[in-house]
Amino acid sequence: MTREHYIPFNKEFLLEQQLKTFSEDPKKTDNFKKLFDIIEHYYHYEAFNLNRNLKQHYALFDPDLSEKERKIFVGKSDFSVFKETLQQVLERGNYIRIDQETLDQAFKDSDLIGLNLSIDFNAFKDYELYVRGHHKATEKVSKYIFWKKEVEIEYYDRVMIYLNYNEADYLSENKVKLGKMPVDPGTIGLKIFKRVPKNDLETIFPNAIPRMSVKDKMLLWVPGIFGGISLLSAKVIPALINMYNAYETGENIDLLNSKTSLNQGLIALGILSAYCFRQYNNFVNKKIKYSKMLSDSLYFKNLGNNSGAFYSLLNSSEEEVLKETILAYAFLHRSEHPLTAQELDDQIESWFKTTLNTDLDFDVKDALLKLKNIGLGFETNGKWEVVSLEKALVTIDALWDGVFEYNY
């Protein structure tokens, strides 16, 4: 499993972990808490500006706004600015874009529903999926009628789907079906989900339609057609012909044997029909299971839609930035000598591994850049160090005060 930059721990939890190193000095503990608090407020203000920028340039493409409302933003919303800002927020939140090969494999496989889903990708100018965090869990999956098998399934903790819909003329010309969800052409849909199976990513597409697989069709139609023809030609039809000919000619026939043959044929046809019905019912049950999974995703797993998704994204990106900054500062502060970026990276990753039993790829370059940008860290001959806690508080306080500077 690929290591991620994502830090799967709450910011308050990580703060408490770092405060343990200052436990013998109450003043340092208090100063570190203050520093954490001011930095958090500063990054929250940055997130506020990003949110305002996103909403401004997304408004023209927001399907939650009426067409009349969207027209107001013609010339005010810029798609390129929106996309660039969205990418920035996703990177800050340590989201990773899923490559096409992984998507194709997910569309091919299915861990839970065992159902083929058809998606008309002509509905979209482009689409992208971003994920963050992953874990494995054991689930029971139905294999046969009375047998369930335990399998290990990989889940993404967070998935964001970006859907840029084609214009109405294109959809009409290509007879594109958007599914049951009403969508305004030319808009951009955003959705965030939690705990999505890696091999069932197609279930979060709003226009995914269940289809019978080749295997399902073979199990349904091949026994039905060939078995039916065989039974009709060998049992039912000959018995009916004999009985009809006897009736026409008035000849005596072995009525008991003819009825027995006819009944056997009809019983066999009934059994065959029951088998075909069971196969079709299996497919219907899979569709019901998919519908339940879809409703669960929309009700229990959905974390935000369209402009509402910004809050979830910005909250997570704000927290990731804060955690990286605090960790980098804390480790450099307690180091007896300056560290190279690689040394700092190794120390933090080793701490996560030994203390929290977590293997991650700490984004040390980004963390050091943040420290430098807010004036808490500096580099000398390839080695990094940070200012003292007292000076850090003065520096970050001045930075925060400057945010609302008013010149008159």
Image (tube, rainbow, N blue to C red):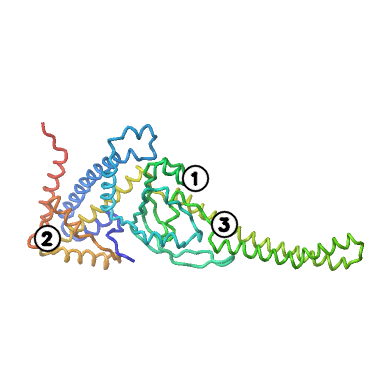
Indicate the quadrant where residue 212 lies: bottom right
Which residue carries the number 2 mark? Answer: 384
- Above or below, 391 against 384 in this view is above
Q: CA distance from mark 2 to mark 3?
A: 60 Å
Viewer-nearest residue: 11 or 219:
219
Q: Which residue is mark 3?
A: 285
Callout 1: helix, strand or loop? loop
Q: How far, Cα to Cα, is label 1 from label 2? A: 56 Å
According to the picture, the residue beneath numbered tag 1 turns out to be: 180
Horizontal and vertical percent for residue 246? 88, 63
- Residue at the image position 43 percent from the left and 42 percent from the top: 183
Categorize mark 2 by other alpha carbons within 10 Å: few (<14), some (14-19), many (20+). Answer: some
* Three-letter residue code for mark 1: Lys
- Determine whether label 1 and label 2 are within 8 Å by CB: no
Q: On the image, which quarter does residue 261 sit in?
A: bottom right
User: Does the rendering let one see residue 173?
Assistant: yes
Answer left or right for 63 relative to 272: left
Q: CA distance from mark 1 to mark 3?
A: 20 Å
Q: Could you tell me residue 272's position as x and y percent?
A: 68, 63
Across and down, in percent, residue 105 comes to: 41, 62
Q: Is residue 171 left or right of residue 93?
A: right
Up-down relation of residue 207 to residue 62 (above or below) = below
Q: Which residue is at the front of the view, 255 or 39?
A: 255
Front disc: 2 or 3: 3
